[in-house]
Amino acid sequence: MVTLYQSLPTKRSFLSQASGIVRTRRRGYGRKARERRRMEMIETEISFSGYLKRYGHLKFIDLSDPPLTKRPRYSPSVIPPLPDQNPIFTLKLSPILLKNNKRKRFTPKSSSSRSVEEITKQVFDGVVRKSSSWIKSEFLGRGSYGSVYLATSKKAKTKTTMAIKSAEISRASSLMDEERILTRLSSPFIVRCYGHEIAREETLFGGERTNYNLILEYCSGKSLFDFINSNLGGLSEKDVKLLARDILYGLDYIHRANIIHCDIKPENIFLTPVENQIRPNGYVAKIGDFGLALEKGSSEYEKESGHKRGTTRYMSPELIRHGIVDYAVDTWAFGCTVLEMLTGQQVWGEHSDLGSVDWDILIGQSCYIPYIPDWLSEEAQHFLSRCLKRDPASSCKMKYPTLYLLCVCGSFGK
């Protein structure tokens, strides 16, 4: 036990009698406070951890005699009492403070006092960088669970450009699932993943937060959605055939890996320019944004079965009606994407003002399919009719329906 006494009443007090808190020149508590007097000097140090009465560290130095060459230091457990003084308050010293005499703030080892870096290393097994190794220069859009930026590496001698999908680390579980899936895939028709980094980054309001940055291949041709909008009236059937085959190759690849994308749409198909005379449009289509993807047979797949997943406009009837998540979900969404490429108009565009319940009735319970114009070639109409079958079992009896569609795809656009 250590007792703190009030200073002499004839002198200017530097201790608050009400709270016993040391007044310092700078903000905060637990710092060194010095008050020199004509006959004496008291040096006080209080280490705080939220409760003054729990932790304290006091040292007294009596300079009533002429100053010595080496000032005496007293242990906190043996403090010379000052005469004729009433105690202000009593502090119980922590054993750690009695043992350690260093001037530093004492913080209890509890879960609430751990830093973000410690939590990150334990939970995510990653290294938190003080600053990101990428310079974000342009906002590209927003994915399922994160914002996408165009970024340039700080370390590379040549300017390496990547797409960075970023989210606050407390909300980055979807990005981690996406990375786990993408690292297993390696196809020229799938957006490539180059890993991740966890870094402290500044916010727009001047603060800082810890972000999970997923490093992805940058497709400079933008998205298929932008490409369709830049070509009013739709694309030629020849170009649609080339892009559709790329998407089918990518879908067939991920389906053979037991992965269902669950969110195929023009916004998630990205274009990369290539120098190839066989491709008049000059682009290769790649599937991206695996934030909603599921691995068939996994625990997450079993957990999400029976729930709607994806963008409502591109959901298949069986997904809306029964929550069935299977390869046919991607096949239906792919058919809607091809229809948009051919017509230049959004699928179900004539029903744009429907509510969520009306969408469920239209797609899940009615007998309608998206409108296929009569002015398309017979081959294109036949291909779309095979993709947009309300009964997925009747569209294809094969295990992987995309393989069947690849064979049908070659029949139009010649």
Image (tube, grey):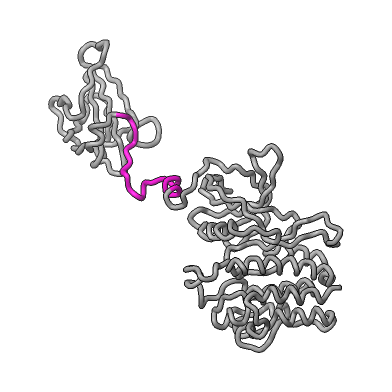
Does the stretch in magenta take in 106?
yes
Q: Residue at x 25, y 36 (%)?
A: 96
Q: Where does residue 296 sit, x and y in percent of width and height?
A: 54, 70
Q: In the orientation shown, which residue stands out farthest toward the bottom?
A: 367
* Count of numbered circles on the image: 0
Q: Quadrant of the N terminus?
A: top left
Please name whichever residue, 256 or 261, is drawn nearer the observer in this view of the structure: 256
Residue 171 painted magenta: no
- Of residues 128 and 287, the one nearer the viewer is 287
Q: Would you say 286 lies left or right of 91 here?
A: right
Q: Which residues are magenta?
A: 102-121
Could you tell me residue 335's position as x and y percent? 71, 76
Residue 220, quarter of the rendered image:
bottom right
Task: Report the quarter where the C terminus lies.
Answer: bottom right
Residues 11 and 305: in front is 305
Is 342 positioned to the left or the right of 208 in the image?
right
Residue drawn at (20%, 26%) of the image: 75
Judged left or right of residue 190, residue 200 is: left
Q: Is residue 65 above or below residue 104?
A: above
Closer-to-camera residue (246/48)? 246
Residue 157 in sight here: yes
- Determine the residue located farthest toward the left in the rendered image: 84
At 63% across and 38% down in the image, what residue appears?
Answer: 155
Location of residue 369 by image quarter: bottom right
Image location of residue 22, percent across then percent down: 30, 33
Where in the figure is residue 241, as x and y percent of width and height? 80, 70
Residue 207 visible in this rendered orientation of the protein: no
